[in-house]
Image: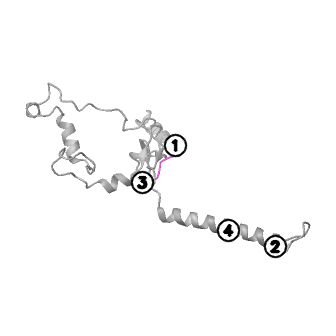
C-alpha cells in the first residue's frame, strides 16, 4: 500500500488553509476526491481535523503588554508585548508615508511587494487593489474613438453628397 501524507493546502479562493490527506510527499495529489477526508476517516475512524475549518483564524490578538509577562519586557518604555515586538521586527515594512520624525530610518524594503499583493476580503475571496490608470492607454482610446466618429460622419456626409437612393443596398 502506498504511503499517505497529511499536509496543508489553500482553499480555492485563497482565503483559508485546510488539512488534507495526499498520496504524494509533496502534497499535490489528494488521496480522494474530498481532499482526503474520507480516506482519513476510513483509516482512523475519526474526522480529519481542520478539514472543514481553516487552520489560520481571522481573530485578532492583543499586543498590549500584560502585567504578568516576563521581567525583561516590563521595564521597557512601551506597552507592547514582547511577542508583538518580535513579529513586527521580523515583518516586511513599507514606512515611506509615515510622518517625519516618527522613525529614524524608514524601512521601505517591502513597499513593492505590498503594492502588488492580493487582498483577502472578509468572505475569503481574493481581490486586487485598485489599478492605476495608464495615461498612454487612455490617450489611445480617446484618439481611436474620435477617429471612429470622424470616419462615421465622413461616410454619412459622402452618402448624402452622392445622393444614394433610399432603397439601394450597400
- Circle 1 residue: 34
Q: CA distance from mark 2 to mark 1?
A: 71 Å
Q: Secondary structure at mark 3?
A: loop
Seen in the picture, residue 36 relative to 139 is either above or below; the reply is above
Residue that sits furthest to the right in the current view: 167
State which tag comes first along the sequence, 2 or 4: 4
Q: Which residue is mark 4?
A: 150
Percent of width and height locating residue 67? 14, 24
SS assignment at label 4: helix
- Going from N to C along the chain, the mark reached first, 4 or 1, is 1
Task: Give the magenta part as a residue range.
Answer: 24-34
Q: Is residue 25 visible?
A: no
Disc nearer the start of the sequence (3/1)? 3
Mark 3 or mark 2: whose residue is earlier in sequence: 3
Which SS class for mark 2? helix
Q: Mark 2 and mark 3 in contact (Cβ < 8 Å)?
A: no
Q: Which residue is mark 2?
A: 161
Indicate left or right for 60 with 159 as reference: left
Front tag of 3 and 2:
2
Q: Which mark is residue 154?
A: none
Q: CA distance from mark 3 to mark 1?
A: 16 Å
Q: Nearer the viewer, mark 2 or mark 4?
A: 2
Pointers 4 and 3 in contact (CB under 8 A)?
A: no
Front label number (3 vs 1): 1
Q: Are marks 2 and 1 in contact (CB under 8 Å)?
A: no
Q: Looking at the image, which residue is at 72% across and 67% down?
A: 153
Horizontal relation, residue 7 to residue 106: left or right: right
The numbered disc on residue 24 is 3
Q: Earlier in the sequence, mark 2 or mark 1?
A: 1
Camera-side mark, 4 or 1:
4
Q: CA distance from mark 3 to mark 2?
A: 76 Å
Amino acid at each position: 500500500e502506498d504511503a499517505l501524507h497529511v499536509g496543508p493546502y489553500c482553499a480555492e479562493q485563497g482565503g483559508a488553509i485546510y488539512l488534507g490527506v495526499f498520496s504524494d510527499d509533496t502534497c499535490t495529489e489528494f488521496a480522494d476526491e474530498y481532499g482526503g477526508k474520507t480516506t482519513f476517516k476510513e483509516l482512523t475512524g475519526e474526522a480529519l481535523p481542520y478539514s472543514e475549518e481553516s487552520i489560520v483564524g481571522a481573530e485578532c490578538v492583543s499586543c498590549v503588554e500584560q502585567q504578568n509577562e516576563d521581567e525583561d519586557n516590563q521595564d521597557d518604555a512601551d506597552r507592547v508585548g514582547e511577542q508583538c515586538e518580535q513579529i513586527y521586527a521580523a515583518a516586511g515594512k513599507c514606512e515611506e508615508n509615515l510622518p517625519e520624525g516618527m522613525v529614524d530610518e524608514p524601512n521601505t524594503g517591502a513597499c513593492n511587494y505590498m503594492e502588488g499583493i492580493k487582498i483577502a476580503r472578509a468572505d475569503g475571496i481574493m481581490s486586487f487593489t485598485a489599478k492605476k490608470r495608464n495615461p498612454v492607454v487612455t490617450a489611445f482610446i480617446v484618439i481611436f474613438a474620435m477617429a471612429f466618429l470622424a470616419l462615421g460622419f465622413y461616410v454619412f456626409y459622402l452618402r448624402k453628397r452622392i445622393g444614394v437612393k433610399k432603397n439601394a443596398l450597400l
